[in-house]
Image (cartoon, coloured by chain):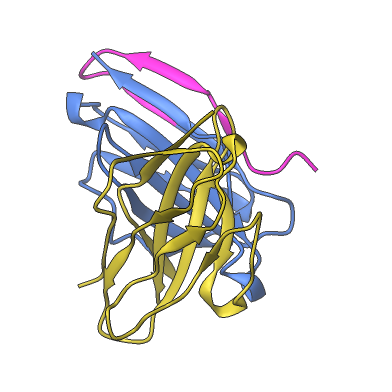
């Protein structure tokens, strides 16, 4: 079992460009979460999917961020257009519905916006 | 509002010394508290949770509702304990993380 995987591991883009991050949860995990850590600050919750449905997207910073989870499998997080303050590490985590406390994290995607 | 604070950004101790990483929280209901750890070049992973009352890798943490604290302790630190430690609170479905404390155990 590879665990939660994220792609790419690093992304460097210019302000105004678009970036799409991908997360593949552990097979069978219906819960999928996105978090991010901007430089020097805490890890912040972005949103939570249960299967393909958005359960809670209260942490999404603004409408430049769009998350999808088509078919309830992998998820993408698109930032369009990217701004300097979007730089940080974006983490994905997954868990079983019955074991929501057991969140397994991916390695993260480091996004740098120049 | 849910909030987790970790007052120390960096904590350095010598091998064999006791270590305590502080965590305080604010939450209006009954929280579930966790400690996560991220070793160098590894992913974030769960270390322990208060409901299990377990000791993992020699670490323990006790939830003190009166002081709203969940400090992480180990009596004898080892060099392999060097890592980033995050205290987290779950209220409802989602987690709130503290800013993290980097523990450095010196030889």
| Above or below, B90 relative to A72 | below
Chain in yellow on the image:
B
- The residue lying at 31 percent from left, 86 percent from top is B29
**Over which residues does the magenta segment extend?**
A1-20
Residue A34: image location, x then y, percent: 44, 49
Residue A78: image location, x then y, percent: 38, 35
Q: What colour is chain A?
A: blue
Q: Quadrant of the N terminus of chain B?
A: bottom left
The residue nearer to you, when weighing B17 against B47, is B17
| Above or below, B28 relative to B88 | below
Residue A107 showing in the rendered view:
yes
- The residue lying at 25 percent from left, 70 percent from top is B2
- The residue lying at 54 percent from left, 69 percent from top is B49
Number of numbered callouts drawn = 0
- The residue lying at 48 percent from left, 60 percent from top is B73
| Residue at the limit of the structure toward the right, as seen here | A1
Q: Is residue B79 left or right of residue B86?
A: right
Residue B88: image location, x then y, percent: 40, 61
The answer to whether residue A4 is magenta is: yes
The residue nearer to you, when weighing A80 against A114, is A114
């Amino acid at each position: 079992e590879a665990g939660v995987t994220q792609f790419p591991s690093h992304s460097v883009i210019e302000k105004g460009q678009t970036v799409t991050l991908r997360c593949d949860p552990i097979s069978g995990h219906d819960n999928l979460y996105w978090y991010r850590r901007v430089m020097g600050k805490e890890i912040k919750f972005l949103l939570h999917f249960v299967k393909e449905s958005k359960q809670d997207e209260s942490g999404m910073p603004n409408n430049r961020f769009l998350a999808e989870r088509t078919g309830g499998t992998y998820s993408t997080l698109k930032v369009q257009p990217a701004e300097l303050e979007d730089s940080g590490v974006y983490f994905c985590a997954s868990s079983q519905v019955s074991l929501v406390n057991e969140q397994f994290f991916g390695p993260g995607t480091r996004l740098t916006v120049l | 509002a849910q909030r987790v604070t970790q007052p120390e950004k960096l904590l350095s101790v010598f091998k064999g010394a006791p270590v305590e990483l502080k965590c305080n929280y604010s939450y209006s209901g009954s929280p579930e508290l966790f400690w996560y750890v991220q070793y160098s070049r590894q992913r974030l992973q769960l270390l322990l949770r208060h409901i299990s009352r377990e000791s993992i890798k020699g670490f323990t943490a006790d939830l003190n509702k009166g002081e709203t604290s969940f400090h992480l302790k180990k009596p004898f630190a080892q060099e392999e304990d060097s890592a980033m430690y995050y205290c987290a609170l779950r209220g409802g479905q989602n987690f709130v993380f503290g800013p993290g404390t980097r523990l450095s155990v010196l030889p």
